[in-house]
């Protein structure tokens, strides 16, 4: 007798088979772009006529363009974005030969000199920021370009030009921490921020987004807002930690009449240079990621910024060497600032002790007294707590011996003196490049 169970089992088997088949049909991966270990890459590009997003696959020899790309057995499709963002987001529509890195940089610098009226040094720095935005995966900490000064019109002109040139450039104003968190994660956006002031909370978040491998928790997920930052404001009271990755370009009124830079010219510049810069990116990104740049001539605080700027020209050693001249003023300013910083003064006190009692022993309290005298002679009347000073020495890598009745002490061995000299060089303390410990001279001497 048939009770219908056979038919039911048959239907269940069919349903199970259909579910198994469904699990093998995977949806394409929505992407903003991919960079693979073999140097291949997928780039998000705009549509030439309909405005719909497409993907460009470059495998090192050939390119494939379409709304759906397959690579390594995985299918990719463009991620979706609000139309308001797409209208303002700069994307290339094709790739076109860019010539040499030197030729491309020269062309960008000429645009900056002509349309923004910047002098050659400033134009050269800004041009390298543009190239860096296309190779941003090669840097550990993104640089920030700050445009500050009374000529707001010139600043606006330069921001508009960088919107035409930078990778994934997005102009914004009225930006808040909440607005920053609403941006697409992992898009490598070049943030072009123009507003009167930058608040402390926004400044901190921009700083937190600058290291490559740091993500910001948001709504149960992690935001990746890593991308070059361009900030145009009337005044920016940045703290030291941000200024160390910042290049300031003064917006000073000039007497010359700048040429027109109307929307039609901007469209032509965008179409021409975005295509060349996409070609530059796919040709140079692997080399930039492998670049070994010797930044030891800079003070320690400037090395990451210098390395990031050098990475913009990864195949041209002469252009990399120019970074030393381009950043010389910033390096000297930081070195001068280190002259009275607490870590620098702690190192100097050890150097003074090494000069006066090589191979001897000195108590931490005595080193603190030397540091107070160094500060006093430079116009800073500060009392050094021996306990706090001892902790500073430990953080700098100096070992203290067990406490006795007079406190903790440091043995001034050759290794200790050698470390103090190396730290002095790394911290940019003036007067130690010759290898001689500095004298605790009066301020300005």
Image (cartoon, rainbow, N blue to C red):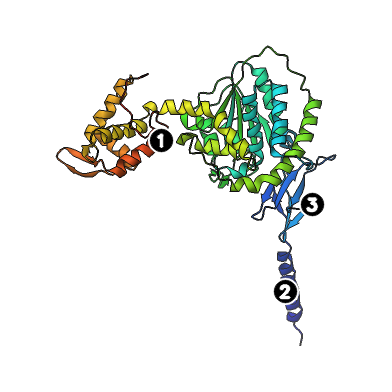
Spot occupied by residue 185 in the image (x, y as percentages of width and height): 62, 43
Could you tell whether 424 is left or right of 216 in the image? Answer: left
Badge 3 density bin: few <14, some 14–19, many ≥20, Cα 10 Å: few
**In this view, 46 is above or below 249:** below
Q: Determine which quarter of the picture holds residue 170.
A: top right
Question: Left or right: 388 with respect to 203?
Answer: left
User: Horizontally, is 65 left or right of 335 in the view?
Assistant: right
Which secondary structure lies at badge 2? helix
- Mark 1: few, some, or many residues within 10 Å (few <14, many ≥20)? many
Q: Distance between the residues labelled 3 and 1?
A: 51 Å
Give the Cα separation between the discs numbered 1 and 2: 76 Å
Residue 64 numbered mark, or none: 3
Instruction: Residue at the far front: name it.
Output: 434
Q: Name the residue under label 2.
A: 12
If you read the primary sequence from the N terminus, does the residue marked by circle 1 or circle 2 appear first?
2
- Disc with the residue nearer the chain's start (2 vs 3): 2
Q: Which residue position is annotated with label 1?
A: 425
Please state which of the two labelled residues, at mark 1 or mark 2, is closer to the viewer: 1
Pinpoint residue 244: horizontal percent, then vertical percent: 50, 32
């Amino acid at each position: 007798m048939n009770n219908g169970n056979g038919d039911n089992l048959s239907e269940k088997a069919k349903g199970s088979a259909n579910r198994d088949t469904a699990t093998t049909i995977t949806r394409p991966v929505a992407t903003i772009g991919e960079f693979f270990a073999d140097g291949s890459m997928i780039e998000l590009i705009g549509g030439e006529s309909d405005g719909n997003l497409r993907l460009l696959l470059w495998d090192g020899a050939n390119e494939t363009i379409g709304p759906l790309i397959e690579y390594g057995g995985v299918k990719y499709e463009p991620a979706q974005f609000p139309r308001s963002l797409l209208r303002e987001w700069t994307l290339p529509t094709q790739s076109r030969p860019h010539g040499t890195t030197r030729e491309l940089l020269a062309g960008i610098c000429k645009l900056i000199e002509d349309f923004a009226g910047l002098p050659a040094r400033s134009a050269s720095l800004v041009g390298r920021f543009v190239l860096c935005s296309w190779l941003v995966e090669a840097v550990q900490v993104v640089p920030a370009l700050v445009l500050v000064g009374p000529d707001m019109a010139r600043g606006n002109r330069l921001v508009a030009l960088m919107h035409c040139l930078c990778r994934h450039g997005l102009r914004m104003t009225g930006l808040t921490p909440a607005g920053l968190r609403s941006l697409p994660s992992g898009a490598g956006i070049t943030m072009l921020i123009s507003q009167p002031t930058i608040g402390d909370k926004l400044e901190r978040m921009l700083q937190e987004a600058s290291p490559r491998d740091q993500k910001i928790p948001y709504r149960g997920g992690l935001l990746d807002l890593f991308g070059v930052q361009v900030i145009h404001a009337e005044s920016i009271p940045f703290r030291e930690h941000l200024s160390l990755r910042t290049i300031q370009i003064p917006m000073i009124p000039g007497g010359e009449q700048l040429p027109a830079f109307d929307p039609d010219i901007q469209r032509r510049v965008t179409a021409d240079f975005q295509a060349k810069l996409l070609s530059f990116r796919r040709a140079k990104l692997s080399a930039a990621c492998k670049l070994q740049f010797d930044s030891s001539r800079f003070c320690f605080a400037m090395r990451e910024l210098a390395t990031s700027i050098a990475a913009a020209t990864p195949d041209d050693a002469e252009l990399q060497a120019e970074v030393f001249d381009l950043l010389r003023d910033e390096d000297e300013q930081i070195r001068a600032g280190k002259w009275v910083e607490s870590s620098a003064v702690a190192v100097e006190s050890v150097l003074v002790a090494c000069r006066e009692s090589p191979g001897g022993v000195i108590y931490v309290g005595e080193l603190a007294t030397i540091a107070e005298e160094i500060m006093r002679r430079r116009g800073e009347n500060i009392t050094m707590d021996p306990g706090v000073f001892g902790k500073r020495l430990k953080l700098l890598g100096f070992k203290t011996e067990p406490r006795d009745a007079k406190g903790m002490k440091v043995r001034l061995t050759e290794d200790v003196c050698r470390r103090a000299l190396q730290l002095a060089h790394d911290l940019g303390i003036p007067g130690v490049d010759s290898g001689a410990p500095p004298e605790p001279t009066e301020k300005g001497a």
